[in-house]
Image (cartoon, helix red, strand yellow):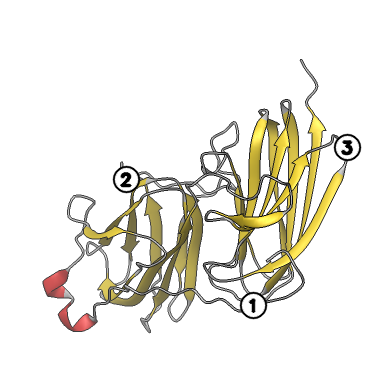
Amino acid sequence: MLSTSKTTQTLGLTNSLRSTRAGLFSRDPGDSIEKAKDIGTLSRSRSYSRSGEVGKKDLDFFRFKLDGTTSITAKIKNEDKDDDPIAMTILDRSGNTIRGSNGKFLFKNIQPGATKQIAASLSSGTYYVRLESAKGSQQDYDFDITASSSIGSGLGGTSSGGIGSGTNLGDTQNLGRLQSGKTYRESGSVGGDRDIDSYRFTIDRTSRLFAELSNNGNDDVAFRLINTSGETVKTNNGNFLFANVKPDDDERLLASTLGAGTYAFVIQSSVGNNEDYSFRLDQSDVTPI
């Protein structure tokens, strides 16, 4: 939220699909993309959870779809007591490992007893999660994947330039036309699937944009830059302008050549409640070559 008052919102996942290890082998997710377990379309009201096991040639694949640009979180706990890790990877429809906004692959190696997650903003399409253990045998795991609101309905907000309720964007503040050399500083708190903040603005020429988010809360906070179609903007090298910010940390997004138009920075925390943040935005002109 953008104001100083705080409300508590929790992420309600009302259609969670669950299975247990008891029937694992009769419902094996499949050892390849072609045999992947289809878990359907993820949305804020539909998540998926499973307990299973992997080891050597016994891999588990899960296929899911997204209807629009969506923030997803895939989490796994390695329940095994041996010394062998379990690897989790997010793949595109062709089986290629996806890179996050920081250029790193969406991959985690989870040691026995540990829990790790992958948070990413993905555009509409079909994706896969691959779980494997190259050295282990029947490594037990608990896996779940959730999605926060799809951002695909445009910028919404109010036309008067004040704070209003935007479609899928929570509280929207219109910063107006950005002025070169001016620093914009904002703060607020977010949490859950509905308590989302966004900052709408316009640039009238190709510009260099720098944004920084400081997470002053206790849970992860994500922020992204979207266009008027609700799509997460990509850099020239194809990386999404998205970052997941850990508590007491900060992350920066840089668009070196952003075309003229209207955009919005969206700030949210799918796992936290009343997570305080501070936000900074700078715009500068691009020098013609």
Residue 188 is left or right of residue 21, and the answer is right
Q: In this view, does 193 lie above or below 66?
A: below
Give, as a three-letter code, the residue at label 1. Thr
Element marked by disc 1: loop
Across and down, in percent, residue 259 comes to 66, 28
Residue 266 is left or right of residue 58, and the answer is right
Q: Which residue is drawn at 40% across and 54% down?
A: 90
Q: Mark 2 points at which residue?
A: 95
Give, as a three-letter code, the residue at label 3. Gly
Q: Nearer the viewer, residue 65 or 135?
A: 65
**Farthest residue, direction top:** 289
Across and down, in percent, residue 28 comes to 17, 68
Across and down, in percent, residue 151 comes to 50, 51
From mark 2 to mark 3, how far is it between C-alphas? 43 Å
Q: Name the residue under label 1.
A: 7
Of callouts 2 and 3, the N-terminal one: 2
- Mark 3 Cα within 10 Å, few/some/many (few <14, many 20+)? few
Which of the two discs, 2 and 1, sits closer to the camera? 1
Q: Residue at x 68, y 28 (%)?
A: 260
Which of the two discs, 2 and 3, sits closer to the camera? 3
Q: In this view, does 289 lie above or below 68?
A: above
Quadrant where the N terminus lies? bottom right
Q: Is residue 72 among what the camera can see? A: no
